[in-house]
Amino acid sequence: MNSFLKVLGLIFILLGVCCLVVYATAMPDNWLLVASLVLEVIGILAYILLNKIAK
């Protein structure tokens, strides 16, 4: 379980990057930019906090 928690933040960051790729290539809608921003901020915070907790 600790190994999953350590990579949970990275999963959110990769989902945010996927939203940016879809925005750049297929669908230039503003909700994709907002979704990628939210996913990347959550991912960064989760990565920092969960790696401090799950030592």
Image (cartoon, rainbow, N blue to C red):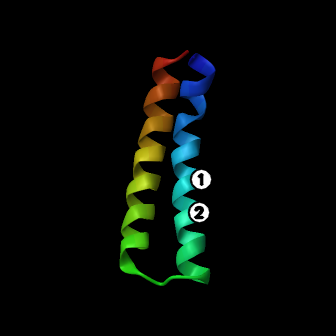
> Who's the residue at 51% across and 58% down the image?
16
Residue most extreme to the front: 26
Q: Which mark is residue 14?
A: 1
| Residue 54, horizontal then vertical, whole percent | 52, 17
Do residues under tags 1 and 2 come within 8 Å of each other at their CB atoms? yes
Write down the residue under mark 2.
18
| Residue 25, horizontal then vertical, whole percent | 61, 82
> Who's the residue at 43% across and 30% down the image?
49
- Residue type at mark 2 is Cys
Position of residue 35 relative to residue 8, above or below, is below
> Who's the residue at 43% across and 71% down the image?
32
- Residue type at mark 1 is Leu
Position of residue 30 relative to residue 1, above or below, is below
| Quadrant showing the N terminus | top right
> Who's the residue at 48% across and 23% down the image?
52
Position of residue 44 relative to residue 34, above or below, is above
